[in-house]
Each structure stands twice: as structure tokens, then as C-alpha cells.
Image (spheres, rainbow, N blue to C red):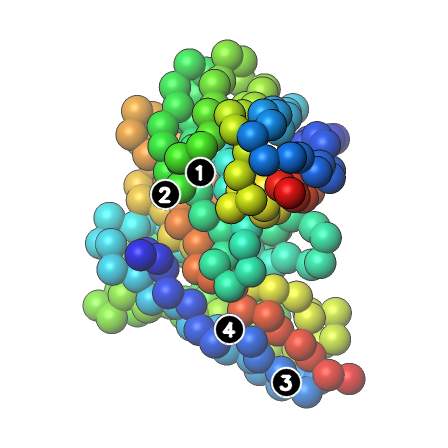
Amino acid sequence: QQQVKQSPQSLIVQKGGIPIINCAYENTAFDYFPWYQQFPGKGPALLIAIRPDVSEKKEGRFTISFNKSAKQFSLHIMDSQPGDSATYFCAASPKQDKYNNNDMRFGAGTRLTVKP
Amino acid sequence: NAGVTQTPKFQVLKTGQSMTLQCAQDMNHEYMSWYRQDPGMGLRLIHYSVGAGITDQGEVPNGYNVSRSTTEDFPLRLLSAAPSQTSVYFCASSKGISEDYGYTFGSGTRLTVV
């Protein structure tokens, strides 16, 4: 079963809108929560990441909100642009350990379309 | 600044054939992983490595082997290809134990098994 559940599967917004993508997890050992952006034919690229000791992180137009008690986190894209049209993946990873863990799990992805 | 290089970009195999997907990184990253991407299922972890000589299984390891003899290279072997292994395969690497666990992905190998 998928350890990170992502919704919605697809999302269409108008230029300037604020798409929100949500993720939920069960494993309390997860310690690092990144978001990746993927354009067609390319590999995913790290967009922004958060750790559970903060509730929000902002980088440019991208914001992660994190709710540790609910085990949920979300990506908000402010003033969205057609160039933001891509597939977005949330992910979660346990605390890195030299001998134990390099086990990042991904959500199923959200295909975002921003209309001009 | 090559980053993570995957070869080949495309491959068609017949059922039962074997092949190796190559992955190399030039960032001196300790951690490397292989993922497969299928529609509606996101990226699923096949195998990963926390350093040269150390590998472990991910979510979907059956039908795949890996080895890590050097820090730079992490090849993925398909022992006897099956149509269910038709997918896009991504190799990724990261610094490992650090403040930033973020992965750098290669551009992928699109594999079709007929």
C-alpha cells in the first residue's frame, strides 16, 4: 500500500489562481517531506522541502504547510503561471541513517494545468 | 556538471531477455536509488544504496538486481524481462546524511517489454 497518499490526481486552475495539493502519511518515522516537479520527458526536480519541526516553509511562490498532528502536508502555488503546468509529487523519507535508511516514498502525483 | 546520467534513454526488450540499465553520478553522493514510474502510481522504489558495497530492497524489488561497487555507479539489472516491467526507470542520488536529503534524478530510461 502507498505510504504517502496524494490528492487530487489532477487540477486545473486559471493563471493567477492558487492550486493546493495535499498529502497524508502514516509512518511517524518520516522526517523529511520534499515536493518534486516533473515536466514531460524529464526526471523529477526538487522544488521545496520541509522538516516536521516547522509548520510552514516558503520559497518564492511555493509554500509548504505541515500539520504534524494530522500527519498531513500540502503545497500551495501562489500566483500560478502557465509555466507551472507540470506533475507534482510529494514524498517522505525517514531519518537518514548510514546503515539503515535511504527509503524515500512518493505520492502518486498531481497533474497541474494552469490555463492562460 | 553532468549530475546523474542514465543510459540508454529508450529500450525495447523481448520477454525473457536480460539487460542492465546504467546510472552514474559525478557529485560524490553516497546515496543512490532506482525508481520506476507508472501512470497513476507515482514513483516506486526498487532498490537503494547508502554507499559502495551496501544495497537494500525497496517496495518492488522482484525481478531486479543491483550492485554498488563504486560510489559513482549503480546499475540495475533485469534478469528475465516481463511485460509487467514496462515502465520509465529513474535513478536518483543524494548527499546522504546531511540537512538536505533532496534527490537529484536522471532523465530516465523508457523500457518496453514485448
Residues under numbered marks 3 and 2 in contact, where contact means CB atoms less than 8 Å apart: no
Q: Mark 4 packing: few (<14 Cα in 10 Å), some, or many (20+)? A: some
Which residue is disc 2 drawn over? Answer: B59
- Identity of the amino acid at label 4? Gln
Question: What's the CA distance linking mark 3 and mark 4?
Answer: 14 Å
What's the chain of the residue with tag 4? A
Question: Which tag is nearer the camera, tag 3 or tag 2?
Answer: 2
Residue B46: mark: 1
The residue type indicated by label 2 comes to Glu
Disc 1 with disc 4 on a shared chain: no
3D distance between C-alphas at marks 3 and 2: 34 Å
Residue B30: percent from left, percent from top? 48, 25
Q: Nearer the viewer, mark 3 or mark 4?
A: 4
The answer to whether marks 3 and 4 sit on the same chain is: yes
**Is A101 on the left-hand or right-hand side of B22?**
left
The chain holding disc 1 is: B
Q: Which amino acid does label 1 sit on?
A: Ile
According to the picture, the residue beneath numbered tag 3 turns out to be A13
Give the position of the C terminus of chain B as an image quadrant.
Answer: top right
